Amino acid sequence: MPKDRSQPDACPGALHVHQAADGALARVRLPGGLLTAAQLQVLADAARDLGNGQIELTSRGNVQLRAVSDPGAFAERIAAVGLLPSATHERVRNILASPLTGRIGGVADLREVVGSLDAALQADAALANLPGRTLFTLDDGRGDISGLHGDFGLHAHSDTEHTLVLAGHRTTHRVHADDAVELILGAAHAFLDLRDRHWRLHEIPDAIPRTLERLGLDAESAGPAQLSAESRPAIGWLTQHDGSVALGGGLQFGLLDARLAEFLAAVDKPVVVTPWRSLHIFDLEEWAAEQVVRVLAPMGLIFDENSPWLEVTACTGSPGCAKSLADVRADAITAVEQSELPVVGRQHWAGCDRSCGRPRGDVADVVATGDGYRVNQADR
């Protein structure tokens, strides 16, 4: 049922931080998940100097720091390396793109589209009024991103033609690549006209036909975009179109330690944060890729696609969240180390029924009750 939000959206940003039980939480938007070496180094330094020593990866390909002692100083640091290009639009720059686009697979290279969309979004003053939970999706045709239920998106059919995606549904409307950014920002404007107190497009009754009507398009729409087999992180050794090597690395609970981040920055290659809380390191020569695996695997970057840690996610839990009924991460670690996970396959451990951070798809829920855990099996 559509939700009528009675309070303004309070999704945290780098300037609008959230006060959690363990201190200020600051979130940094990374359009397309991209981080340069210099940006990664600044985040590592900030995590060590101002936070709890860790960088958290989010399900939208963003990063956040917890227990930030000086949010103002943090904002200044990241602004100096281009991670805070707009004070007015900082929370709405949620742009997910196929992490491997342009390098491995896909029918289109959407890297330039990410930059064009981000620049156009920031240049549009009215779109600063979008809720912080708004999500733009750019899928290069492989089906990994369209199924993540964004508000406005593109699904590539070729280098020159995309399908408009609204509220996680593929519409029947196709758009030329040159006009694609203008179209999805037009859809965002339509949402602002229609939204009332709603935070997401899908919460509005008849959102898709009403949005298409505002765009002057046929109100007919197709079925929902489905998650594909590629909806999990690509882990390990990956060969790029140009013969270079990319490495996919997972992280326990999506937590990147500051020291590991410093070593990643020293590799001096593009890094992309994925919506599965993993990392891709691109454009490596083979000898360099071998060295990266040799050094970073013992530090916690997971290159084994069969690791049980790729199946287990968890919310912050106690003591970071006052609502949590258990230290779920500590309990999950014990379960993995003792080979006593309560279910087989993907599972999300949560400190309460809100199940914050739960990934989409077929995932079992392991929920703290105050007297142990309740397991809700995944829908199969």
Image (spheres, grey):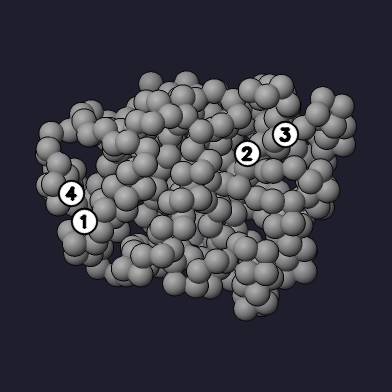
Please provide percent x and percent y for residue 244: 73, 26
User: Is the Cβ of the residue at disc 2 closer than 8 Å to that at disc 4?
Assistant: no
Please provide percent x and percent y for residue 43: 70, 60
On residue 278, the disc is 2
Q: What element carries label 2?
A: loop
- The residue carrying mark 4 is 215
Please provide percent x and percent y for residue 226: 35, 27
Question: 242 or 293: nearer the eye?
Answer: 242
Q: Mark 2 or mark 1: which is in front? A: 1
Q: Mark 3 or mark 2: which is in front? A: 3
On residue 106, the disc is none
Residue 48 in the image: above or below residue 143: below
Q: Mark 2 or mark 4: which is in front? A: 4
Q: Is mark 3 on a helix, strand or loop?
A: strand
Q: Mark 4 or mark 1: which is in front? A: 4
Distance (Cα) linking label 4 and label 1: 7 Å
Label 3 environment density (alpha carbons within 10 Å; few <14, some 14–19, many ≥20): many
On residue 190, the disc is 1
Q: What residue type is labelled 3?
A: Asp
Residue 1 in sight in this render: yes
